[in-house]
Every structure is written in C-alpha cells, then in structure tokens.
Amino acid sequence: MSLSPPPANIPTALIYSPPEPLELLCVFPERTSRVCAAACSAVERAGGEARSLRCARETLDALRRDNDTRVPHVIVVDARQPQQLDALLLARAIRGTKNTQHVYLIAIVKKSAYLKDEFGVLAYLEAGFNRVMVETVNTTAWCAEVLQARSSAACSRAQIAATAALAAAADRCRDLVAITDDQQRILLTNKSWCRMLGWRLEEGPRPIHEAAGGEALRLATTGARDWEAPVTLRRRAAPDPIMLPCRGATIGLTKTTSHIVFVCEPSAGEGDRGRGSLHSIRRGSLDVRSVASDGLRRTSLAKLQGLPLEAPITKVISLLSAATEGAPPSTVACIERAVDMLRTSELYSPQMRDETKLRVEDPIATDLIGALLSREQVNQNLVYMQGNANVLSSRRSSNDSTVVRSQTNRTNIKHKTTGQLRELLDTALSWDFEIFRLEDLTRGRPLAHLGLALMGGRFDVCAALECDERTLLHWLTVIETNYHAVNTYHNSTHAADVLQAVAYFLEKDRLKNLLEPVEAAAALISAAAHDIDHPGTSSAFLCNARHPLAILYNDVSVLESHHAALTFKLTLNDDRVNIFKNLDRDTYKTVRHHVIDMILATEMTKHFEHLAKFVNVFYAKSSGSKEDGMHTDEPLSLDTTALSQPENVLLVKRMMIKCADVSNASRPQKFAMEWARRIAEEYFLQTDEEKAKDLPVVMPMFDRATCSIPRSQIGFIDYIIIDMMEAWAAFIDMPELVNHARSNNQHWRELDEAGVTTLADVKRVQRQNAIQAPPTTTAEPTTEE
C-alpha cells in the first residue's frame, strides 16, 4: 500500500473529440443587430456556420429539436437589454436542457455595465455562462473570440465524452462500483451496486458510511493512494450486512484528493456458485479483527432465530435459496437476482424502465414527472434559508374558527334547486358532466350542490351513516368553505369533479357488487375532502419553505396528511356537521380508516407503487421480464379472484380515487383543456413565488416565460395516465377512459406542432373551439333561494 500523493495521470488518448466545423448560435432580440452580424461574419471566415434567433422560446425549441444532430459549439446571448431578453434565465434553461454541458455560452454586455461592477460577472457565471464579453462590431475581434471559444468547447466536449465513456464502462461491469468525493459522499454508483444494495440510480449524493463500513473505509480516510481490504455493505431491508473484498484508489489532479473509487468483487473465487450469490458472499475474505464481534453477533442471531417469528417474505427467500441446490448456473443466477430484488424494502417503488417509451426527452415533462413522483425531491431541495417562509400562516391561523365562520354562510346554500341548476344536476352521473357550468351557476360553490345531489340523493349516504340530510348539507358547506377559491386548480370545483368521477365509477357493476354502502359513502367523503385547505403549492414547496405543516408531518405526505386530519377535525368539532355522530365505535373506526387510506392514496409520489400492486394482484402476469429476455407482449388478463380478500379491496378503492383525482386527461377534450390551463397556471404561480422568496424551484421548467403547456400534458398522459387508465378501464369496463386520454394526447401533439405553448395560446384555442362548437342554451344563473 502506497501513501504517495493521489495519481495525476490521465489517459491522453481517451480525451478525444472528432473534428467538427464550428457551429454558432446567436440569440439577439434585434433583427438588425450589428454585433450579431459581426459574430456571424467571423464564424463564416473561420469556416463555420452561424444562425441567429430572436427569443428564448425559439432557442430552447431549437436545442430540443436538434439535440441529437446539431448542438452548437458556441451560443452568444445578448444580455444588454434584460427587458427584452432575460439572459440569465435563458442560460439556466439551456443548462437544464439535455446534452448542453459542453456548449460554450458567451454573454454580450455593454461596456458601461462591464466596468461598473468588478464582481458583476459572477451572476453570469453562476447562471451558466462561460464568458462575459463587451459588445463589439469588430469582425477581427470576433474571429479571435470564436476561435478561442471553439477550442474551449472542443476540449470540454472531449472531457465530457471521456467521462461518459468511463461511466458507461463502470455501469456495465459486474463489480460493484462507487465513486465518492473527498468527503466520502457518493457521487456515482453502477447498476451492480444499486442491484445488490437495493438502491435507485436517481438517488442523490449521500455519505458512503450509510451503506458501507469496515477496513476499506478506514484506509480511504488515511490518504492512501490505493488499497485492498474487506468492506461491509448494508442492503436495504436485509437482516445482516455482507462482506466483500474491495479495491480502492484516491484520485486527484493536484495534491488535493477530488475523488475516491471503491470497487467491490461480488464473488470470492471462480469456484463459487455465481457472482453475487449468498454462498459466495459469505465465503469472501474477512477482517481478522471482526472475529470476536462476529461470535457475539452469531449468539444474538441464534437467540432471534429461536423466536416464533417469521415474515412471509423470509419464507419466500428461504424457498428460493433452497431451490438453487443442484440447479443449472443460469437458473441460479435468475433466482439470486430475484432474491436481491425481494430483499429491498421498496418492492413497489417507482423505477422507470430503460425503454424507448419511457425516455422523457422533454425537460418540461422530465420536471413534471420528476417532481410528481420522486419521493427524494424534498430532501434534495432542502437548503438553509433566511427570511420569512411562513407562506400560509395567515390562512392557517383561521382554521380553529373555520366552523364558526362557515356557519354564517351555510344558509346561503339550500338543498332545493330550480331551473338550469336542477336540470344540470340531473346529468350528474354522466361522464361529460358540465362541471364548469355548475361552477358558474353556483357562483363558485359547486361542491355543496353536487355533493347533496349525489351523496344525499343517488347514494343515500345519510342512510349509510345514520345522519340526517341537514347535517350532510352543513358538512358539505364546511368542507367547501375550507377550499381556497383563489387557487386556479386545487379548489372546490376540483373536489366536485373528483366526487363526480368517484360517483360515476361507483355506478359500474363491478364496484356496485363489490362495495358495501358504508364503503361507498367513505369513498364519496374522501373525494369531497381529499384536497381540503390546499394552499395551491406542493408538499415540496412547503418543505423547502420550512412551513409549519411540513414540520408537523416530518416532510412526509405533508398535504395529504393535512387534508385527512383537517377533514376529521372539522367534522368532529361540531355536532351540527358531524356526519359520524350516530355511528357505533367499530363502524366509525372502519369509515375513518377507509377515508384516511383513500386520501393518502392521492399522493403522487406513491403512484407507481399503488399501480404496480393493483396490476400485480388483479391481472395475470407473464413470467419473466424484458430485461431477462423472457418477457412476452401478450395483453394482461383480468383476474378478479383476489377480490375475496379485504386487503385487495383496499387496492381497488385506492385506484378508484387515484383515477378520479387525475381524470382530467381522460375527460372530453374541452374539459381536459380547461383543467390543463388551470393546473399550469397554479404551477406557474408556485414557480413565481419560489423565485420571489429565493427558494429552490421544484419544477424549473414550469416558468411561464418558457414552458410549453402541450408538452407538459403529453408527458403526463404518456407516463402517468395511459397505463393507469388502461388497468382501471379494463377492471370497471369503461373503455372511454382510455379513448379520451389517447384523443387528448393526439390533440396536444397537434397543438404542439402548431406552435401552441403559452397560457395565452391555450386560451386562444379554447375561444376558437367555443366559436366552432354547436350553440348551447345559456342564461343567467338562477338566484339561489
């Protein structure tokens, strides 16, 4: 073992980039800019090609469209007129686009601004620019500048390509590889490491001591150049750590270490059963100093094994391990891989498959899906901030008096309706129910009217809960009052829409025969209250802002926990609204359990978990997977035999409210467009507030200046809606769910190709569609009694 400085030699042959003619992209708002003309002329003299664009949207569209064929070497951005072009915002957006790390960004500024502040360039460098240049129309100066920029871009491109090649090599080797920084925070792991330890590739930096220990880590901290020693690895949900031989090295271009490499062998010798097998791991080399402690540990394990406790998953793993005896090597390898997967504690956690269909190339869709599904999003965005982050303090301070406040309004809503409102409510069980017309007729209070029509009428919730209709009306009024009408999406209209969808699903024969009246009542209650007191921002926003709700719920399911808790707080605080007051203790506990479970199921971070469980239980599956080479493309067949088990009925109710919650994309086109416009506006407002409060931006591409609404909807339908609606539609026999989703997806693609991007564009399309649509009878809203 050597204690010399870290190795500084880099294989020169690996730093290679094929020669290419210079590609320049100029972004100047002025069509006749002399500075832009000088830059383009200089590039042409140098044998390259230049093109110019006028705005940020055109630039981002060009980068996304030509990402794989024509990525420019140098991009020059006019930063002299921030009122016409926000150069800093554009630079961040460019850096957030795929395959732009090597692009050389130049900001053009006025000489007066350049000389005014000696640290003024820092803002540009932090935004992603490589250089700040004073405006000039001298072609010779520009020629020298672009040649230097091309050289820097080529060097950067070669270095990034070499890094990508090495990362690909590490990812495809069978050894377990982890690379840390000098503080031993893991920066990169390969697939073998993730598979063995139950990690996910997208997980962010974390200290290696959370997963590893032993002599190898001690040597890594001593500054040793390279070493060989055993390392102890902890797998998720595994009872015992595993010990593997490890080779390591420290890397640094100077005397300061920048990276530490750990390479662990998954087998101890050629005679072992298979790489990564349980037997081969236990035969690995051991640290002599661990023998004494190992004896104590075995004594404790012997006592534990004597207890009459055994989980079903342990039995499954034991049976699989026993099946490896005398089996062919290929079978052993498959079984061992299955055991590794079963040992993880997150069997149903979302892990995107590496398929063409699932590669989200659009940064807007990437941001949307990532923010909705990544349960690590909050932890990755937590930063220490100063200032007032109590976004909802004024709203939440009134919660204790909410019931009193709502009582003054409850006489405004009567259960008797006349005219247009009555006619509209008669169609409440139609999938093309006019929810926005109901919003207009009720002056923004659709939930109480629709809730009373469905819960008090068709489904007779009062009989199931043994309460009177007036109590139900008061409860609906209180719940609706505690939705924020200022929210563009998460308001009582959304709650009414979800309630209507759940009611429609409950009318399907399979659910009619499956659910008891009390269960149906609980489902309708959950739908009505599932987003109560929603602030119009995400849980990640509340966590980043250190909001009291995030503190209260430990950054876990913050909003969903609040919705469920507030529902019962408001209901139980006043007998006049307590729809549960006449239930016996056991029935109340059952209803409460169902309501809480369904509201918590609306959390999008657990989307794939709920979907995978539902599909695995109710659909016959082919053996194998694409990755194993044993996958078949045969359609899944519905298997309802599992409905006899109560825990599986819970899966059905979770899927029901989940599909209702995001049913917008499976509604007729005019409804889908309006809901898309509303949710986009709410996301934009959150991004605006995050920027104003200097908080981490959860979805940076949801910026009203650069976002494409059609592309966000295309990504959402492709990666969230289609698979879920196909599974649910087959279960309840409702093919229109999938038909509408596919039709809306195609419509958004047509709008994207037509250049529709912003909220104004979407509103214009809506107006055109309204003009072309057949006329409908309209009249003034009726006066409520």
Image (cartoon, rainbow, N blue to C red):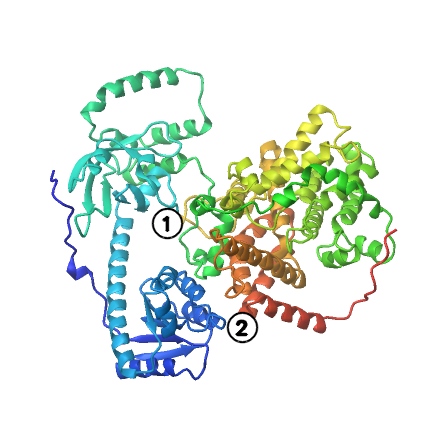
Say if 191 sits above or below 588 in the image. below
Q: Earlier in the sequence, mark 2 or mark 1?
A: 1
- C-alpha span from label 2 to label 1: 41 Å
- Which of the 4 image quarters holds residue 623? top left
In the rendered image, residue 118, in percent from the top left (x then y), is placed at 33, 64
Specify the amino acid type for callout 2. Gly
In the rendered image, residue 297, in percent from the top left (x then y), is placed at 30, 20
In the rendered image, residue 93, in percent from the top left (x then y), is placed at 43, 63
Q: Which residue is pictured at 86% across the width and 51% down the height?
A: 417
Q: Which residue is pictured at 46% across the width and 77% down the height?
A: 29
Residue situated furthest front in the rendering: 116
Specify the amino acid type for callout 1. Gly
Q: Which residue is pictured at 39% across the width and 48% down the height?
A: 202
In the rendered image, residue 311, in percent from the top left (x then y), is placed at 45, 25
Label for residue 403?
none
Residue count near mark 2 (Cα–Cα under 10 Å), binned few <14, some 14–19, many ≥20:
few
Q: Mark 2 sits on what residue?
A: 755
Say if 709 sits above or below 259 in the image. below
What secondary structure is found at the residue carrying circle 1?
A: loop
Asked if residue 233 lies left or right of residue 405, the reply is left
- Identify which residue, 342 or 579, lies in the foreground: 579
Say if 48 sits above or below 472 in the image. below
- Identify which residue, 721 or 314, lies in the foreground: 721
What count of labels does the image hold? 2
- Screen quadrant of the N terminus: top left
Q: Mark 1 sits on what residue?
A: 629
